[in-house]
Amino acid sequence: MSVGGYPEDVVQLLRSAGVSVWDRVRIRKDGQIIEGILMPRPALLGGRALVVKLDNGYNVGVLPDGAQIDLISKGAEPKISSGEESREAPKKGLRNVTIVSAGGTISSRIDYNTGAVFPALTAKELSAIFPGIMQLANVRSVPLLNILSEDMSPSHWKLLAQTVYNEITDGADGVVITHGTDTLHYTASALSFMLQGLGVPVALVGAQRSSDRGSSDNVMNLECSVAVAASDMAGVVVVMHGSMSDDYCLVHQGVKVRKMHTSRRDAFRSINVLPYARVRWKGDASAPIIERIRDYPKRSGGKPKLDLRLDDKVALIYVHPGINPEFIDSLSKYYDGVVLAGTGLGHAPTNPGNDPLARSVLPSIRSLISSGIPVVMAPQTIYGRVNMNVYAAGRLLKEAGVIGDQCDWTPEAALVKLMFVLGHTKDMKEVKRMMETDMVGEISSTSDPRAFLYRST
Amino acid sequence: MSVGGYPEDVVQLLRSAGVSVWDRVRIRKDGQIIEGILMPRPALLGGRALVVKLDNGYNVGVLPDGAQIDLISKGAEPKISSGEESREAPKKGLRNVTIVSAGGTISSRIDYNTGAVFPALTAKELSAIFPGIMQLANVRSVPLLNILSEDMSPSHWKLLAQTVYNEITDGADGVVITHGTDTLHYTASALSFMLQGLGVPVALVGAQRSSDRGSSDNVMNLECSVAVAASDMAGVVVVMHGSMSDDYCLVHQGVKVRKMHTSRRDAFRSINVLPYARVRWKGDASAPIIERIRDYPKRSGGKPKLDLRLDDKVALIYVHPGINPEFIDSLSKYYDGVVLAGTGLGHAPTNPGNDPLARSVLPSIRSLISSGIPVVMAPQTIYGRVNMNVYAAGRLLKEAGVIGDQCDWTPEAALVKLMFVLGHTKDMKEVKRMMETDMVGEISSTSDPRAFLYRST
C-alpha cells in the first residue's frame, strides 16, 4: 500500500482507514466535508497535512488530527510517460526534447502546512500532469535542481549549462528548462554566454501560478515551450505568457528579457527589442502555432561551444541620491567587478561644478578601476541605451574608464556578461573590448521604438 | 557694449570686429561660413567658443581662433518678462505661479567646447525663451540650483522644499520646478513627503532635449507644467511628454512615477497607477487643456506642513545571483537603513533547502536588523506589489523583520520614504509602522491592471 511520503503516524491513520494515495476519499473535520483524490506528499516538504485534489482541480491540505477519513473508491497512480518510455518508442516525425527541471513555480506545490509554495515536482511528474506535451515531441525528463530561483547562483548556471550541453550532445533536438521566474532572465543570459553557437533551441519556461492550482498558466507555458524546443529556432529563449489570457506565449531572446512585474502572468517582457515570436495556444489538442514577430536564429543542428569560465564575484549596484562614496570604495573588498545601474543615460554623481551639497563618486570609481576592478554602466531606467557622451557626468565617467557606452543591455545581462568576461581575462583593456563588443545579441545595434513598454500586438 | 561672458581675448576680438552679443554676424572659418545671432556665453561654462544661433533655431559653437567675424546688423537683447515685471502688473484672472529653477536639460545649454550639455539657463531666461507661459499665469522666477540632477542630494531636496514652501506662503498659487530628468522622480518623492498637505500644485518638469536645440520638447513640457500649476490640482506631480509627438503631456503622481527610458521624450511613466491627467497641447497660442484620467487631489489653497527631517544615510541595494552576504553585512558601516530591490515578489537568497551551491543573505539581513538598521523590500521588477507570504523566501524574510509586505511602491519611493521615516524615528517598530502605512499615496490600496506598461490612451 502506497502512503506517498506521509510521516509514520499519518501512515497508521491511513492504514486503519484502508486508504492509499490516489484513492478517492471523503474527509470530515470540524463539520466540513472534503472529497477528492488523496495525493502523495512530497518528502521534501515535511509536515503532516493530507493533500487532497478536489474535483475542481485545486489541491487542499488538511491536518489529519481529529479528521474522519473514509474510502470512496480505490484509485491508481497515473501513468507517467517518462522520457525513457518515449525513447523506447519514439513517435516518427517528432523531435527529441529534453525537459530539464531546475525548480520554480511551474514545478512546485503548495506547502499545506505553511501555505507557502515549495518546489517539488520532478520533470517526470510534469509529463504526467501535462500530457499535451507528448504530442509535440518525444520528451525525455531530467530532474536537475529543486530550488527556488532566488537561490540560483552562478554555480547552478554551470550545472545547468553542462546538463544542457550533454543532452544536446546526446541527441536532443531541443531543450526545455523549467525554472523559477525570479531569476529566470539571469539564467537565460548566463546560458546565452556559456552555450554560444547553439544550433538548437533552449527554451526557459516558468509559471506565475503554482502547478497544483487550477490555473492553466503552466499548461500553456509548458506546451508552448516544448513546441518552441521542437521548432526551427535556435539559441536561448524565454517562453512565457504574452497576455493576461491563456491565448498566447511570447518567445523572448534570452539575453534581452526581464521580469517586469511581481505577479502578472505576462510579467516577462523583451527589453529594447521585440520578442522573436508569438505562440498561439488554443487549449485543445491542437499544436501551438509559432508566428514570427522578428527574425530569429534558425536551427542548424550545430553543437554549441560549452564555456563554463565565470567569475561570480561581480556586484550590481543601484546608483541613487545619497549613495555613499565610501560604500563604493568598499566594493573592492567583495567583488572583482562592478556593474552600476546608473541614472538616465548612464550617470552617477560626479559633481563637476563642485557644488558644496553634492558628493561625487567619481574618485571612488577611479580608485576601483585603478585597482583593477572594471566598472560597467547599465541603465536603471531599464529601457534605452547608455550614452556617456551627452552630459558632463557621462563624459567624466567614460574618461575615468567606465565601460558600456552605447550599450543597450539590461542591468542583468551586463552583470552576467561581466561575470563571463572576468572568467576569461582580468586585463582591463581586454575586459573593455570584450564587454563593448556584442557577443550573443546582448547589445543591439539599433533600437526599435516599438519595443518600449511593448505589451502586445 | 555687451560681450556676454566671453574671456578677455575673445572680447578683444569681438571689439575689433565691432560686434556685440545679440548682433547678427557672419563667421568664416576653414572655408565654412556661419551666419546667425551671436549669443552670450554663460560664465559657468568657461571656454572660448563663440555661440551662434542659426536661423533654424539650433545653436552652434565656433572657436574664434583663425575665424573672421563680420557684423551683418546690430541686434538687441530680447525683452525678459521676469517675474518681478509680471508681479508689478499681474494679469487679472491669472493665477500666480513661481518657476523654481533646479537645473537640468530643460534649462541647459550645450557646452560648445566639449559638445556636452551643461546646465546654464536661469528661470528668468526661460520666460524669455518660452513667452507662451506668460499667457497662462503671472509668472515669477526663482533661480535656485544649477546642477545636473544626478548630483542632486537629500540636502538639495531640503533647499527645494524650503523654497517651494516659502513661495506658497508668500502667495504662489502653484509652483513649477524645472529639474534634470535623471533623478526628477526621486525629488518628486522627496517633496511629496516633505510638503504634506499641499493645497496647491507643485509640478516638476524636465526635458529630454536641451533647450537650445530646435526641439519643442521643452516648450510643450514647460507650458503644460505652468498650466498644471495654475489648475485646480493639488500635490506634487510630474509633467512630462506623454508620447513621442508634441501633442500631449501626462501628469503623474509625484510619488508613483519613474524614468523608464534613457532618452525617449516619453520616458516618464506612472508605475502601478494611471497618470492623473493628460494635458493636450496644440503648439499655438491656445492654452493647454487638462483632461482627467483618474481622480486627483483638488486645490484647497491649504498651506503644506514643511518637514525637512530626513536621514540621508539609506542605501538602495539590487538583489542578484552572486550577491555576497559579507557585502550585505558591510552596509551597516555606511548606512542607517537599507532598501532591497528584491527579485520577484520581494525575495533574496535565503536557501531554505540548504543547497550546497547556494549562499543565503538571510543571516546578514537578520544581523542588520538586530543592529537597528531597518531593511525594506521593494520590487526590482519595477511593476507590481511586494508579497512576502507566497514563497518560503518571502516568509523567511518577513519573519526576519523585513519591512514592506503588500507595498507596491517603486524602489525610489521606498528609498526616499525610508530616509524621511528615519529622520523622525529610529525605533524599529515605529519605522515599520510608518513605512507600511500609506503616507502620501506611495502605497496604492488596489492595483489597476491598465497601469502595467501604460503607454498611451
Image (tube, coloured by chain):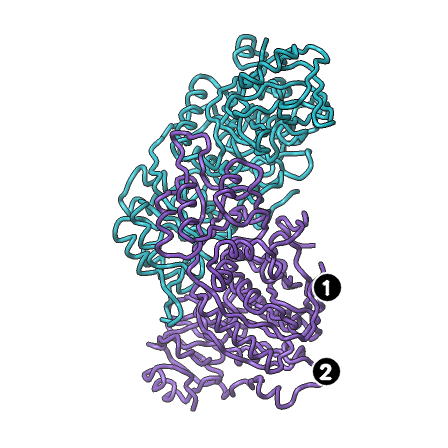
Chain colours: A purple, B cyan
Residue at the image position 69 percent from the left and 10 percent from the top: B74
Residue ID for mark 2: A93
- Where residue A355 appears, as percent x and y from the top left, is 42, 29
For the point 49% across and 88% down, which residue is it? A74
Give amino acid for label 1. Answer: Glu
Residue A184 image offset from top left, x and y in percent: 52, 63
Q: Secondary structure at mark 2?
A: loop
- Mark 1 is surrounded, within 10 Å at the Cα level, by few (under 14), some (14 to 19) or many (20 or more) other residues, namely few
Q: Is the C terminus of chain B in the top left, top right, bottom left or bottom right quadrant? A: top right
Chain ID, mark 1:
A
Q: Does residue A364 appear anywhere in the picture?
A: yes
- Check the residue under mark 2 and report the chain it is in: A
For marks 1 and 2 on the same chain, the one whose residue lies earlier in the sequence:
2
Residue in the foreground of this view, choosing between A341 and B362: A341
The image quadrant of residue A89 is bottom right
Identify residue for label 1. Answer: A291
Mark 1 to mark 2: distance in Å?
21 Å
Q: A257 or A36: which is nearer to us? A: A257
Q: Quadrant of the N terminus of chain B?
A: top right
Q: Residue B271: where, in percent of width, then height?
A: 53, 45
For the residues tagged 1 and 2, is the chain the same? Answer: yes
Task: State the residue in front, A428 or A303.
Answer: A428
Q: Secondary structure at mark 1?
A: strand
The picture quadrant where one finds residue B346 is bottom left
Q: Amino acid at mark 2?
A: Gly
Q: Is residue B396 above or below residue A386?
A: below
Disc 2 packing (10 Å; few <14; some 14–19; many ≥20): few
> Which quadrant would residue B138 be assigned to in this image?
top right
Disc number for residue A171: none
Above or below, A326 relative to B69: below
Name the residue located 39 percent from the left edge and 72 percent from the top edge.
Answer: A31
